[in-house]
Image: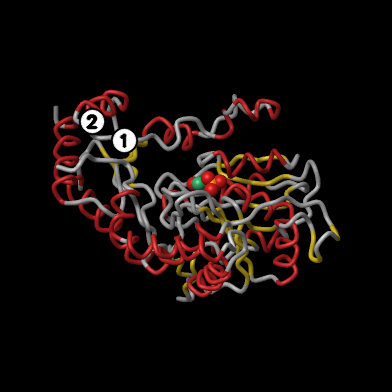
Amino acid sequence: MRPIQMVDTHSQYLAIKSEVDTAIHDVLDSAAYINGKAVQQFTQSLGQYLNVKHTIPCANGTDALQIAMMALGLEPGDEVITPSFTYIATTEVVALLKLTPVFVEVDPHTFCIDPASVRKAITPKTKAIVPVHLYGHAAPMEAIMAIAKEFNLYVIEDNAQAIGCDYTFSDGTTKKTGTIGTIGATSFYPSKNLGAYGDGGAIFTNDDQLAHQMKMIANHGQQKRYYHEVVGCNSRLDSIQAAVLNIKLKKLDEYNAARQKVAAFYNHAFANHPAVITPFVASYSTHVYHQYTLQLKGVNRDELVAYLAAHQIPSMIYYPVPGHRQDMFAAFGLKEMVLPITDELTNSVISLPIHTEMNKEQLNYICLNVLNFLNK
Ligand SMILES: *Cc1c(COP(=O)(O)O)cnc(C)c1O
């Protein structure tokens, strides 16, 4: 059996090797390493795929979130509501910009931001909400957008884990996640559903003015070379990464379907087992399974992780410490704050290997071992 990995980017590469190698060599020959043709092509193709007016490539997903927040003209002390149960990048940029992160609860089924909790957290200082489409499932955008409208707030979607996910509104219309809020941000980190062979990110918006502002900010605050209008940063997607992404974008739906097959296999194996809850999929969302995450009930998680590791099966805890308890936010004095659902999930979730190159033999082996442990 091929060794089992959380993500197998190398096997995926081998399946597209000749196409990728040619594209990379084309960039090398073009000498347009920054902002070359591949970047322009990818930017256009991604915008078409997502059906969004403006796509701005940048250096990584964290920068994408930061540039989005910089463009909104938020002032130090302004409050930004985010889930505590997310990857640190979502909230780190809030603090970096001297804004105040306000941590709220997630829904225990979808693991995504809870609209009721958002509503309760709103104060006169609230300026923005950052829903995260965690693990590849959409946050409840319709409810979030309604709250944002009512209180005149910006919405920045953290779409780093859910590129390709579809959101269906109650009127039946569908949009890609990342294109619903004021701004969407994503990452092309190698292990993401659309991953480069290095770092990369992008920002999306349908707002012309914001797009203009974000393009400037990502490029040292300039529109015209050497005339710097605002304080920005240097955040670029390089041409080699864009050339890789051009190839992989064409396969994104296929890749997400492969992940869905893996998830269906796991769901079937673990269905109705009293010790685990399999991932929930809300009627408004598809699930692109950036992660396949189980909730354990009355199971010693550390022992399960060790048991799997002893059988050469990797597993991960996303995320072992919620944002509000991280040392980096100690100045906000939130460590004692109780978010019962977040705390419960932090202690009970476990993510199993999921990627586009898994085979039945590997899946059978993982399921067998998980069930052996649970039924001990
Ligand atoms: C990966 C990720 C990011 C950051 O992306 P980078 O490209 O690593 O900077 C932000 N938010 C979430 C939810 C992520 O999973």
Query: Measured from the top left, where is residue 99 in percent x and y?
Result: 74, 42
Amino acid at dot 2 = Leu
144 is higher (above) or lower (below) than 375: below
- Residue at disc 2, secondary structure: helix
Which is nearer the eye, 364 or 29?
A: 29
Q: Which residue is mark 2?
A: 308
In the rendered structure, are the residues bearing label 1 and label 2 in contact, judged by CB atoms less than 8 Å apart?
yes
Quadrant of the rendered image containing residue 295: top left
Amino acid at dot 1 = Ser
Query: Measured from the top left, where is residue 331 in percent x and y?
Result: 70, 26
Q: Which residue is mark 1?
A: 315
Which is nearer the eye, 219 or 240?
A: 240
Which residue shows up at 34% across the image and 43% down it? Answer: 293
> In this rendering, would 132 be left or right of 223?
left
- Residue at disc 1, secondary structure: loop
Residue furthest to the front: 29
Quadrant of the rendered image containing residue 22: bottom left
Which residue shows up at 61% across the image and 51% down it? Answer: 130
Q: Between disc 1 and disc 2, whose residue precedes?
A: 2
Is the CB of the residue bearing disc 1 within 8 angstroms of ligand 1?
no
Which is nearer the eye, 369 or 150?
A: 369
Report the label total: 2
